[in-house]
Amino acid sequence: MKTVSGKEFCRLLEAKGWELKRIIGSHHIYTKAGCPFRISVPVHGNSPLKIGLQKHLMKLAGIDASEL
């Protein structure tokens, strides 16, 4: 699986209909109408997300590995 940075993952979330609600420090908080949870993405420059966190966020957002 290709790893992506926090910035790239945020762009992917926005393309899927997620809305940026707020930024707390380096964490971008996203919500989507009809979803009871929010997604917090750490954006630390262009450093890639750790693979376990990336898989978890992809599962929550309904993103397939082929969409990366």
Image (cartoon, grey):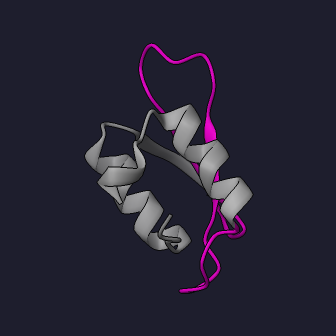
Q: Nearer the viewer, residue 40 or 55?
A: 55
Residue at (61%, 41%) from the top-left corner?
39
User: Does the magenta segment cover residue 10?
Assistant: no
Image position of 58 (left or right of 23): left
Q: Nearer the viewer, residue 59 or 21?
A: 59
Pick out the residue farthest to the left. Answer: 15
- The overriding secondary structure of the stretch rendered in magenta is loop
As displayed, is residue 21 above or below residue 53?
above
As displayed, is residue 24 above or below residue 25?
above
Q: Position of residue 23 (x, y in %)?
A: 61, 58
Q: Position of residue 52 (x, y in %)?
A: 73, 56
User: Does the magenta segment cover residue 48?
Assistant: yes
- Of the 4 image quadrants, the one containing the C terminus is bottom left
Q: Nearer the viewer, residue 39 or 66?
A: 66
Pick out the residue farthest to the front. Answer: 1
Q: Position of residue 36 (x, y in %)?
A: 60, 16
Image position of 21 (left or right of 27): left
Q: Position of residue 63 (x, y in %)?
A: 41, 41
Residue at (53%, 71%) from the top-left corner?
3
Residue at (44%, 59%) from the top-left corner?
10
- The span picked out in magenta is 24-50
Tag count = 0
Q: Which quadrant holds residue 17? A: top left
Q: Nearer the viewer, residue 2 or 41?
A: 2
Q: Which quadrant holds residue 38? A: top right
